Amino acid sequence: MNNDEFYIGWMEKAPAGFAKYIKKMLLILVVVVAITGLLLALSQKPFATGNFEFGKLTEIRGVYFGEPIPLLKAVNGKDIFGNTSFITIPLIGFGKSGVADVIAGIEKQKNIALNRKEVTMQGTLLYNDGKLLMQIDSKDSIFLKIGADAGNILSPVITDLGEQVIHGEIVDPKCFFGVMKPGEGKPHKDCAIRCILGGIPPVLKVKDEKGNENYYLVVGENGEKMNEAVKNFIAEPVTVHAKVVKYDDWIVLYIKKKGITQFSYLREHFGGAIASCEPARMK
Amino acid sequence: MSASYEAVGWNRQKKFYDWLIAGFCILYLAVFIGFTAIYNPQCTFETMLIRSAGTLAILLLHIILAIGPLARINKKFLPLLYNRRHLGVTMFTIALVHGGFAILQFHTLGNVNPFVSLFTSNTQYNSIAQFPFQALGFFALLIFLLMAATSHDFWLHNLSPKIWKALHMFVYLAYLLIILHVMLGVVQYETNPVFVIIIAVGATTVILLHLAAGIKEVKKDSQLFDRTDQGFSYVCNVFEIEESRAKIFCIGVERIAIYRCEGRLYAVHNVCKHQGGPLGEGKILDGCITCPWHGYQYLPGNGQSPPPFKEKVSTYDVRIKDEKVWLNPTPYPEGTERPGAMI
């Protein structure tokens, strides 16, 4: 650079020495920007494979159950032995809300108790990893048909798996199974809290030793909602002490009083008070 | 330099600068979005938008913070300093896309107002691992908003350069908040160390550049002027100052620039009234001292900007005795005519 060169932005052209130097720097910057974009793009965790059929309504016929959470039990083809198989579809509300108010409103309006009724419902499906959920929106006609009481025809097959201690992460199933990617972990924590406080039933996501994930619905010791109680445990490693009950293709955790704590490596490995996690046993 | 306010005082270099900003942003977005879509076909539009905007804003913030010290270390970087404000406003706009969409995605359609949700969903402010990192990003965005909104020279003049500069120094607080926002947020989710490495490299570069620039300034300022005579200090030999250029001397706490112009020496306060640029690193153009940062001009004899401009800087007495330059560090009121010293 000629020492007499002087740069001022409002001049028509930058002096040759400045222009040449800046061009070199800009070329370096092009490489830095491209490499940074590439590295960040390739370093992200793989996105979940969940789906949310946004804008698409699907009709499903089945039996509505209000317990342990609002759900629809529907026929799901036949199993390998040719027997009719069923799928349990937890119901969730629009946005960050549960369905309790929507269902209560319909029951009041129609003066009917929907529990165990044969129904045809429509909503938006979301699904991942073998689990199917349905979002229902009060703006749509949710119940296309409300039939007779199903009695015990489709009553869930309930198996008591005893009391267990399990480690996992509490997620909101709506985001986790399809609406958001990621629908778990720290970046999603606030949203998960808002969803669960809005009434969406909490789910414990548990990873076994082989890396397979299992999902358990979380309710209180007597089947009451745990939404408020789990607020400070969402999206972080937790240990739960619960009575475990299998309802068809879902497992429900009846969390003991004070049965949920933040996971502590030291307590787990040196405390001796809590048994190790064996989620595989719960299948 | 302008006597009246316009939204943007466009000139060729500003346009060129803005096209470059747009080009770099498009390049980054194309690379990030393209490779994410190829290697993660399950990605969603919302997450892509939040992540691409967030990472681009942080990259731009690092470039913005690096330009200042780079220009102090090497004058050849001055073209990057000019119009840096447009880079800042661009960074804020992109950060706003990131923050706005994150609030929309994570906090709307709930049972409370989204802004209430932002601060009350996760309340584990006493935990490092579970700290509500989104609040940190929100406050950083507020600072960027304040800076972008006051970036125009209208605010610089009305707030006064001192207050304006102090306000814009909050960028360092915002930078700290952003680093914490990343470290307590996405870094706790992602398992690849690349995220931490990139942030560490970025922060280290910014810190080292500021240290290097600071050390250079301190070295300049630490020169002792202990030969005094009737309030004047001996500063240098007359031939050490080139024609149309200046040397800067720090006597006490003030930096003073001694310019050589058409056979005379003139001393003026070194700090430009526009954004505090170093007048002594400028040059005499069209008979005026011209600031290297944005080209603001002052007459060497009285420190006044030529009409219709109204900026003024302090002037000082300077003497030459036996080819030695003596400077009196007592300032005259801004804009005071001084005869200078004939060489």
Image (spheres, rainbow, N blue to C red):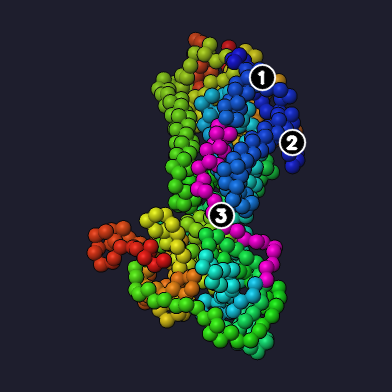
Marks 3 and 1, how far apart at CA: 55 Å
**Marks 1, 2: nearer the viewer:** 1
The image quadrant where one finds the N terminus of chain B is top right
Q: Are marks 3 and 1 in contact (CB under 8 Å)?
A: no
- Residue B296 in the image: state x and y as whole percent: 66, 30
Which element carries disc 3, helix, strand or loop?
Answer: loop
Q: Is residue B102 above or below residue B215?
A: below
Magenta stretch? A32-59
Find out whether residue A55 is within the magenta segment: yes
Pointer 3 chain: A
Residue A49's disc is 3
Q: Residue at x 67, y 42 (%)?
A: B152
Which sits in the foreground, B213 or A18? A18
Mark 2, residue position: B9
Residue type at the position of mark 3 = Thr
Which sits in the foreground, B180 or A2? B180
Q: Is residue B259 left or right of residue B9?
A: left
Mark 1, residue position: A15
Q: Residue at x 59, y 79 (%)?
A: A63
